[in-house]
Image: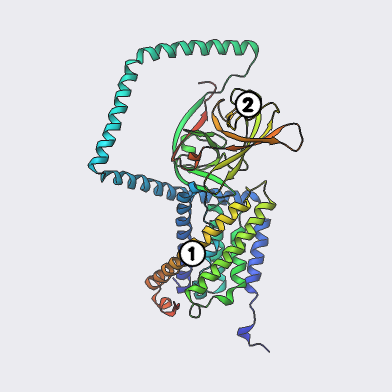
Amino acid sequence: MKSSNRLFLLFTSTNFLVIGCLALLNSFLCPWGVFLYLPGLFLLPHYQLLDPYRSLISILLTGFVLDFMFNHLLGFHAFILGLIYLISKAYFHLSKQSSKEIIAFQLIVNFIISLIWFFQCGFIRSTIGDWELIRFLTDLFVSSLVLIPVSAWQTSLSNSLLYHFEPSAGQAISISK
Amino acid sequence: MAAPQDRPKFGPFLALGCFFLVFITLPSGWKTLTQSTFDEFQSPLWEITSRVSDLTDYWGHQADSKKTLISKNRDLSRIRTDWKLQESLLKKWENEIAKLNGLRSQLRVLEQQIGLDSEQPYLPVVARITHRNLSAWWQEFHLRKGKKDQIKVGDGVIFHDGIAGRIHAISSRSSKVELTTNLNFRIVAHFQGDNRPVIFQGSGVLPGGQPTGVVFDVPHDIKIIDSTPLLLETSSLGGTFPSGLPIGQVISLEESGDGLFKTGKVHLSKNLNRVSEVTVLLPFPEEN
């Protein structure tokens, strides 16, 4: 198998695994009326190692799974994440950005997508439920807090997997602390 | 002039745009098919997770201390005593059952004579919850049982505090329950001790975990006295649930916009978010 295909499978399956963990975590947290909404987490800086087309397919698949799992409009996250990835592609420079910058980028993306989904819920209230303002603010605040450690964990998980499965690509990564 | 490597590449944008166009023109049947295929694919994974969680719970109890075991044994002996007491009353309960069956057959005869629809009997199926998805916009449970256990879309789901929701999607070994808090969940209900029908609709979960709903079309003479909440119950008019099951407590009532009826806020049981096992009510076949 080609190296780029291996990387594609690796990043996509890592994203699927993180979505599964997120679903379990949400299932555990829901009695307290909190929902972790973290779509920004899936814009990994490691996509820099792939060509734009493979990255886009990986992001589209991740987005569709996210939509299926958390009952969003089918295709919402797939296309939003895809578009944000393409627009911000110039930002993905593994060797040039620190983990703080990655977290800041993911926080901003998370905020933008949350805001779009909040307005979307308001517009099509009859099809999908409503995301009330107070609940939106609570969820956004808690999600942003949780995103910081989870983002660091996910980046380090992707790094270790990369070193394990694709050592040549793994050596190319040097994210500064 | 910009160097070739500095020029923006529009190929991926074009690919995304084309895929988007193809996606929105795809018939909804294809999307539904993909979704149900994905459900079938992922449900065993959730079942495994749920079973592993049950097993962890079991092994966790294996390491219980002597103190815990003594306290559990004390509870068990109390249950056993109660069980023995109930067994001694067996003869009495059998007589009561015979009496009730006699009354039921009399009722059926009377219903036939005056042309009333009889209360639909239900077959209970107990199912464990694999995971919950309680976002602000959609609230659902995933159950371990599906088509193989005769569960169908639209079947009512109850738990120890009242109604939990109804089945809205199903695959061979799993099913999804749309909860009573869901905005799309609407049923006919009535207040305890008042047979006039009202409409209940879910309205999500508040921060802190309080499940809520709204009641519409409440007659004007129904009032909340001394801040005592009114109990809302299911009505047999809906067909999904038997009559008289608790839905929640109406904590406030106010005039609706039309001036004809009142609208109220309903607080549902907090245990709805924590429940780990529910009962699906299957409609009993007429011929049985």
Q: Chain of mark 2?
A: B
Q: Is residue B11 left or right of residue B281?
A: right
> Which residue in the protein does label 2 denote?
B237
Q: Residue lying furthest front in this view? A: B226
Asked if both marks, 2 and 1, belong to the same chain, the answer given is no
Mark 2 residue element: loop
The x, y position of residue A96, in whole percent, is: 50, 80
Q: Quadrant of residue B241?
A: top right
Q: Closer to us: mark 2 or mark 1? A: 2
Q: Is residue A47 visible?
A: no
Q: Is residue A130 visible?
A: yes
Q: How many marks?
A: 2
Q: Mark 1 belongs to which subunit?
A: A
Mark pair 2, 1: CA separation: 49 Å
Where in the figure is residue B265, as x and y percent of width and height? 62, 38
Contact (Cβ within 8 Å) of mark 2 with mark 1: no
Amino acid type at image mark 2: Leu
Q: What's the residue at 45%, 77% (across, down)?
A: A175
Secondary structure beneath dot 1 equals helix
Can you tell which quarter of the image residue B236 is in?
top right
Quadrant position of residue A39: bottom right
Q: Is residue B235 left or right of residue B90?
A: right
Nearest to the observer: residue B226 or residue A148:
B226
Label 1 packing within 10 angstroms: few (<14), some (14-19), many (20+): many
Q: Which residue is mark 1?
A: A12
Q: In front: A50, or A103?
A: A103
Q: Position of residue A89 (x, y in %)?
A: 58, 74
Farthest-out residue, bottom:
B1
Name the residue type under label 1.
Answer: Thr
Quadrant in the picture for the N terminus of chain B:
bottom right
Image location (x, y in percent) of residue B5: 60, 84
